[in-house]
Amino acid sequence: MRQLSAGFLFAMLWASAAVATKFGIRDADPLILANVRFLVAGLLMLCYVYVLRRDKQYALPKGAEWGHLIIFALMNTTIYLGCFVLSMKKVSAGIGSLSTATSPLFIMLISAIWVKRKLRWYEIIGVILGLAGVGLATYPLLQDSHASLDGLAILLFGMVSVSVATVYYSRVQWKLPNIVINGWQVLLGGLLLLPFTGFAAHFSTTRLTLTFWASVFWLIVPVSIIALQLWFYLVKQDAVKASFWLFLCPIFGFIYSSLLLHEPITAYTFAGTALVIGGLYLAQREKFTRKAQ
């Protein structure tokens, strides 16, 4: 029962990121929202480990660790989350949640290329189904200004970046605790984004309203802290079962976008989501089958 509750809560919180972002960019430039989120979240985590905890295990990065952190921060925070926030100006929150759910497919594809492993037939079909599902769910939204091709391209570029970051992370022999890695990569990602924000953001139209700060709070605490801790708990209990909860994220995402933002849900939405979930399951069928045996 505890895992069931944790799984549902994780999916509900994780899927809310796109809607929270939509509310935040109503009053502020997307890059400003992203920068404030990254810098505040990074500083909070680092203050926790270095000021409040002061444990010997929370050491400062050394030598090559700084290089690994900068590369990871660039791909995982600066590019991926920067692109995600920018795309929310041009695509619906539901599509944002649906695209996030496809990350295991991109990770599998990039990982196979990285280690020069030949993809199995069901992995290839899974990737095709996942991409087709996103395309199908997006199709009617392109007709009524709830999505644009350039917005989808930005979103896709971000998904590729985070997938490369995930594979890179798994290949590095990290000696730092997870919270130290996360704190530094978020802060460094925000610092790397600052020049782009200073050059391209529209400061004159940005208003730091209560809605903006509520969005920042939600993206930092429920999404970045609570949801991630729940995810780590689920993975620790059973990594295979944990991945099933990712299947619920696009469903919750479309529910939130419909109820809170009044974005349309059509037959294309249901069919596209079903294809994505089917593609995710098919691509990981060996893992699920192995666990069942």
Image: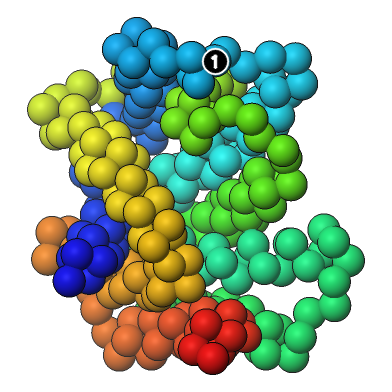
Q: In the rendered image, which residue does mark 1 sit on? A: 59
Kind of residue indicated by mark 1: Ala
Residue at the image point whose x is 78% and y is 67% from the top: 112
Residue at the image point whose x is 21% and y is 32% from the top: 217
Residue 251 percent location from the top left of the image: 28, 74
Q: Residue 109 or 205: which is nearer the viewer? A: 109
Residue 77 percent location from the top left of the image: 53, 36
Residue 143 percent location from the top left of the image: 39, 74
Examine the rendering and report whether any part of residue 110 can be seen: yes
Residue 146 vertical placement versus 285 (above, below):
above
Examine the rendering and report whether any part of residue 203 can be seen: no
Q: How is the image coloured?
A: rainbow
In the picture, which quadrant includes the N terminus? bottom left
Residue at the image point whose x is 24% and y is 36% from the top: 221
Residue at the image point whose x is 67% and y is 68% from the top: 108
Residue 146 vertical placement versus 266 (above, below):
above
In the picture, which quadrant includes the C terminus? bottom right
